[in-house]
Amino acid sequence: MFRSTALALAIISLSGGISLAQSGPMPSIIVEHAWARATPGNSKTGAVYLTIVDHGASPDRLVGVASAVAGRAELHTMRNDNGVMKMHAIDALAVAPGAPTELKPGGYHIMLMDLKQPLKEGDHFPLTLRFEKAGSIQVTVQVEKVGAMAPPPGMKPGMKM
């Protein structure tokens, strides 16, 4: 009986390895360090920051974002308008191969509007990024403290959900 059980486990193991090897090429877009700041009080808006790395041979564009924690999500940038920093929505964000594209405080970022509940430090939530060529990628966003300016040191890349 032990031999037949061991043989069955070996076959299952091998067949799983084969299917993994045939599941397709490594994705060309990798999303790293997806994080958000905790929101104070009853704030209905939040922001997400992350790094996008394109390992493909040609440029791509981030064309949409969505999350179940918010009524809507948009791509935004900050611009200096006569000495005053102002936030503006953008339709898409170019992602060049081989060069990380950073979404960070004071620059490109994802705005979450009509939050369904406050973002609390230590929580995690799903975020879907839609790329023109690479399609949709879902990552987990880690919520950091209110006022955080960067992800914590040693933060692991955002994991697909």
Image (cartoon, rainbow, N blue to C red):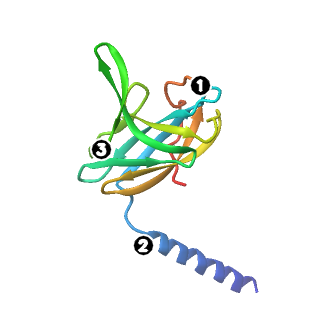
The answer to which image quadrant residue 134 occupies is bottom left
Q: Tell me the number on the disc at residue 36.
A: none
The answer to which image quadrant residue 6 occupies is bottom right
CA gap between label 2 and label 1 equals: 43 Å
- Give left or right: position of 99 versus 47: left
Earlier in the chain: of badge 2 and badge 1, it is: 2
The x, y position of residue 118, in whole percent, is 63, 35
Q: Which residue has dot 3 on it?
A: 95
Amino acid type of the residue tagged 1 in the rendering: Val
Most foreground residue, 8 or 77: 77
- Label 2 Cα neighbours within 10 Å, binned few <14 / some 14-19 / many ≥20: few
Asked whether the residues under the numbered discs 2 and 1 touch, taking CB atoms below 8 Å apart as contact, a structural biologist would say: no
Q: Tell me the number on the disc at residue 22.
A: 2
**Quadrant holding the C terminus:** bottom right
Q: Is residue 9 above or below residue 64?
A: below
- Label 1 Cα neighbours within 10 Å, binned few <14 / some 14-19 / many ≥20: some
Which SS class for mark 3?
Answer: strand
Tell me which residue sits at (48%, 74%) in the image: 19
Amino acid type of the residue tagged 3 in the rendering: Val
Q: Is residue 63 above or below residue 114?
A: below
Which SS class for mark 1?
Answer: loop
The x, y position of residue 139, in whole percent, is 50, 49
Which SS class for mark 2?
Answer: loop
Q: Which residue has dot 1 on it?
A: 146
Tell me which residue sits at (54%, 39%) in the image: 114
- Label 3 Cα neighbours within 10 Å, binned few <14 / some 14-19 / many ≥20: many
- Give left or right: position of 92 versus 4: left
Tell me which residue sits at (39%, 52%) in the image: 130
Amino acid type of the residue tagged 2 in the rendering: Gln
